[in-house]
Amino acid sequence: MAPTSHPNDPRISNRRKVQVNAEWDPMQAVRVHLPGVETFVGILDPEPNLFLDEFSLVDAQREHLNLVDVIESSLEADDSVHFLHDDLAHDRRMDGLLSARVSFDLSELEADEQVTELDSLWTRLHQLQPHTQLQAIASNARVKRHRGEVDEGELAADSSRIRWDTTSVELSEPLTNLYFQRDPQFVTREGVVLCRMKEPTRRPEVGIAKVAWEAISGTFDVNIVADMRSVTAHDVTAFVPERSDIQSKDIVVEGGDFLPAGEFALLGVSAKIPDGIAHPEFGITADDTEFVIRTSYAAGHKLLMQDVFGTPEVGLVRAPFEAARERSTDSDIDMGIMHLDTWFNFIDDDLVVAHRALVDNTTVDIYQHTGEEGRPYELTHADVNFGTYIRDKGFEIVDTVEHIDLSHELAVDVLKGITNFLTVGPRRIIPVRFEPGDEHVTAGFMEVLQEEYDVEIVPEGEGCYIPNLREGYGSIHCMTTPIRMMPE
């Protein structure tokens, strides 16, 4: 929300814009969320909560706080790491979320007690620390007071009746994935795009993200350029008849598919399916021509028509589903290409890390900015080889597969997370380390980056060991959303 101060007020004019130019630009501010009790439910029941496996919440919190320390120490700006709960606490923005997602049931108490106790509970809730409040919000908590049985004469004169009561807390469809802050939104040159996530269990995260952006509008210049939550359909063929193979009109989009690159930007979208090919295990029939993994082509094109990117060129990168299937027997191969950042990432303006075989065996549709009202981008080149496109832009591709031991028991996991690093500046990255000790599975990969490409690996040339956080099915890039990344 825009501040009410006069536009010439120096407090407003000095605000930095929430803006990202390129993935390799120096990071000035980034947001994270420390996992809390809402994550515990996903640990108890991983699969419907999109987790890989169970893990220790306490250890995950330790890993997360260490990761925050690493990020903070690698950035030069003060107050560079924002916790979601702290952002939400600005200007009491948390209050509305508390009212919407936390409730109290005191129906077992006497009518005259209910009013007093309810007022006391709400007052206490609004006085709690912001992270505690956010855990209640993310958990959709319902607190119920149970009346304890007290026999006549059993309650001493100086004893409180309430002390005999007990409490239950119901966590209803908690937002277990909230610590993966990348996906509910992404930031372009123009501002913030609020996403419409594919899995319904994650969609309420976007509303919390919106409140957080509004809450920091007094210190940052926040422009929400698109809110996709209520946008459900878009017909690509009405704008681009030559893309008649785009069947789905459904709008689903997630931040892990967006990678800014200065004068151009990339958005990962639906995979292409060859004519007559069926993959029943993925719900793909012989009549299907696209497979929506997390972001649909329709959503990508809709965002182009809303002119949210601010770049002269945007590439819609098709997920390399067929190429990935040909190169792996992993039954969860779609998760390995779930987002663009799971198989491709930028380190500098001339260097990327990627699964080169996937890059060379998928395509990108290139849209150029025209500025025309109602149709600001035009498809100029369709089905361009993605590898050719990236090399023509002047990037060298470091192949992840070439530098890890494919026979290692962790090789499949590595290939799903090795590109999911956080670039904090030109040739400075914070990657995940998959094993403790010096002889970890990605040691050779990190050595090549440092010695042959002059890449600084943070911290101490090793990256971060986060085995518990990773069991949530994501890595360091997934756990962060940039607030500002601009050239110095």
Image (spheres, helix red, strand yellow):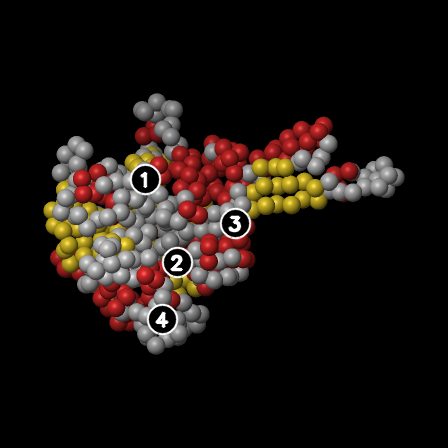
Residue in the image at 36% along x and 28% along y: 2
Of the residues under marks 4 and 1, which one precedes in the sequence? 1
Residue that carries the numbered disc 4 in the rendered image: 411
The CA span between labels 2 and 1 is 29 Å
Residue that carries the numbered disc 1 in the rendered image: 232
Front residue of 73/125: it is: 125
Q: How many marks?
A: 4
- Looking at the rendered structure, the secondary structure element under dot 1 is loop
Residue 16 badge: none
Q: Amino acid at mark 1?
A: Thr
- Looking at the rendered structure, the secondary structure element under dot 3 is helix
- Looking at the rendered structure, the secondary structure element under dot 2 is loop
Residue 324 in the image: state x and y as whole percent. 27, 65
Residue that carries the numbered disc 2 in the rendered image: 475
Of the residues under marks 2 and 1, which one precedes in the sequence? 1
Q: Quarter holding the N terminus?
A: top left
